[in-house]
Image: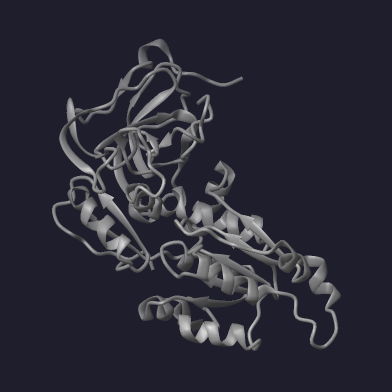
Amino acid sequence: MFAVTTLASLFTLASMAVADTMLAAVYTPGNNSLVMNPDFPVPTAGDGQVVLKVAACGVCHTDVFLLSAAHPDPRTYIMGHEIVGTPVQLGAGVLSNISTSQLYGVHLFDPTSPDPIAFQTGVGLDGGYAEFVVVNQFQLIPVPDGLAPEIATVATDSLTTVFNAVNNNAQVAQGDRVLIYGVGGLGHQAVQLAKHLGATVFAVDIRPEARQLALSLGAEQAFDLEDFTNVVNNGTFSVDTVVDFVASAQSFTLSQAAVALKATNGVDWARVARHGKIILVGFSADTLWFDSADLITADVAVISSVYGSPDDMRSAFDLLAQGIVKPVVNVAPLEDVNSVLSSLTAHQITGRMAVVPGLVQFNATSGR
């Protein structure tokens, strides 16, 4: 039987006073930048809800995709879905194990919502590009002791997504040859996880600094686009699995060639039994074309992969706490979120970015 709070603590405020208004970065249909509102009302906790003081919120390519209007969203809401924070207000019915002294990560999906896919925290519902955010108590997952908030943000989305893609969907195992296509915020974590699972890891990225990062994290080889195209087209390079964080028409075509069954020296029946895999993780506006006969005869499985479960998020926190995955994370003030999004759009960021409410000036840090 679950323990619940007593009547006297149904509405609990932390010792720090909560203001009536806050700074928030608001997605507004028709704008390709967020609207900075310094007087947005601070939310209050309803039944089963918790108001968090946001410690850090990761900046994600999903936000860039939404702001591009490639998939228009008619709603208005505070963006930001990679949230880490501390409770400052507990609503009625919140379980007694929710502590105002604990740092929590927020899982995107509210399990009590009638439509948790359409209405996610930071995508449809007000999110974490703000000083405070309200979430359901069951979205909260404790951050392991010792993890800085900006490092913990990667477990709320990017590393959870990587874990689901690499561990669950690709089922990477000892001895596999795995290509990470795109060594960005997610890709550089995927290199580390695939390596940890025993794979020989390769990478491809157009940016020299990203290729160097992949090599420093244990990749066997990191290709630029021209070299990768050449080795795939001449048949001198192949892998068991491609995890594609770009998902462009070009990356999809090259990935098919990289995992296609080769039969120049007879059929490798062990390879047929496990299939070549393309794991699609990235978002793009491109249409991805394939011929079903080509996929079947080349023994290629195409699997889309999105986010992960609360248990996957706990696994992501464990990977961070154990130092198995060491993400590169830089921070900036919440006020600079539009500049960060612009840099992300221009592929000028290596690793991840997080915005921090109340940070006085840009402060570059690293989780490595």
Residue 146 in sight here: no
Q: Position of residue 365 (x, y in %)?
A: 28, 64
Q: Residue furthest top?
A: 7
Specify the quadrant of the image occupied by residue 208.
bottom left
Report the colour scheme: one colour
Q: Is residue 281 left or right of residue 337?
A: right
Q: Is residue 248 above or below residue 81?
A: below
336, 237: nearer the viewer: 237
Residue 294 in sight here: yes
Q: Position of residue 275 (x, y in %)?
A: 75, 67
28, 217: nearer the viewer: 28
- Image quadrant in which the N terminus is located: top right
21, 287: nearer the viewer: 287
Q: Position of residue 286 (x, y in %)?
A: 48, 59
Q: Is residue 19 left or right of residue 65?
A: left
Q: Residue at x 66, y 60 (%)?
A: 302
Q: Is residue 235 left or right of residue 204?
A: right
- Image quadrant in which the C terminus is located: bottom left
Q: Tell how many labels.
A: 0
Q: Position of residue 238 (x, y in %)?
A: 65, 80
Q: Is residue 28 above or below residue 292?
A: above
